[in-house]
Image (spheres, rainbow, N blue to C red):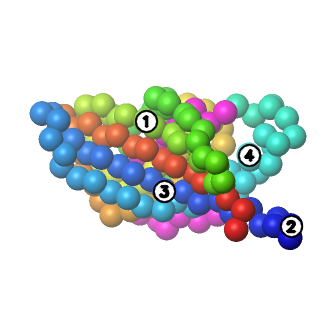
Amino acid sequence: MINENLKLSGQLNIVLKDKAGNIKDRVEVKNLVVNTGLAYIASRMTGTSKSVMSHMALGSGTTAAAAGQTDLVSVLGSREALDSTTIAGTNDEKVVYVSSFEAGDATGAVTEAGIFNAASGGDMLCRTVFSVVNKAADDTMSVTWTITLSAS
């Protein structure tokens, strides 16, 4: 039997640490692959004219994630270059993006996140909204975002 149902899903894992390296908060939340993200994926299947996903951003917007969104509602600071991008999996393919927000980066009440293919503008792949994570000026935040492609 041929199975042609492709499913995209994503999960964001956030770890917030104080200046001494103690874990202050952990958050796991699902994400939404937005319309521009789906168009981006399709475009990469036919060519490479679009840049690879390269940045992650945090924000303080609380508007629910919706398919038509193209950016975060309220960005905190600037987009951070990804620390790493890896591909894993045998039956379900996973793309794992990791970014670290150092002390002074994206400080405030963090409630949203997104993945982008540019430091500004560009295409947004995913957006998610979650309960507030308060990042103080001397805190660090590690974000691991896993996108899973599976045939369901």
Instruction: Give the side of residue 77 with respect to residue 64, left or right.
Output: left
Mark 3, other Cα within 10 Å: few <14 / some 14–19 / many ≥20: some
Task: In this rendered view, identify the residue nearer to me: 84 or 100.
Answer: 84
Name the kind of residue labelled 2 in the image: Ile
Residues at discs 2 and 1 in contact (Cβ within 8 Å):
no
Q: Earlier in the sequence, mark 4 or mark 3?
A: 3
Asked if the residue under mark 4 is in contact with the one under mark 1, i.e. CB atoms within 8 Å, the reply is no
The amino acid sitting under disc 1 is: Ser
| Gap in angstroms between the C-alphas marked 4 and 3 | 19 Å
Distance from the alpha carbon under mark 3 to that under mark 1: 14 Å
- Residue at screen point 70% across, 31% down: 51
Q: Amino acid at mark 3?
A: Gln
Q: Against 49, is 106 above or below? A: below
Instruction: Identify the mark nearer the N-term, 2 or 3.
Output: 2
Disc 1 marks which residue?
99
- Mark 4 or mark 1, which is nearer the start of the sequence? 4
Q: Do residues under tags 2 and 3 come within 8 Å of each other at their CB atoms? A: no
CA gap between label 2 and label 1 equals 37 Å
For the residues marked 1 and 4, what is the alpha-carbon distance in whole angstroms?
Answer: 21 Å
Tell me the magenta residue range: 52-69
Circle on res. 11: 3
Task: Decide which of tag 4 and tag 2 comes sooner along the chain.
Answer: 2
Q: Secondary structure at mark 3?
A: strand
Which residue shows up at 38% across the image and 58% down it?
Answer: 28
Element type at marker 1? Answer: strand
Q: Which residue is mark 2?
A: 2
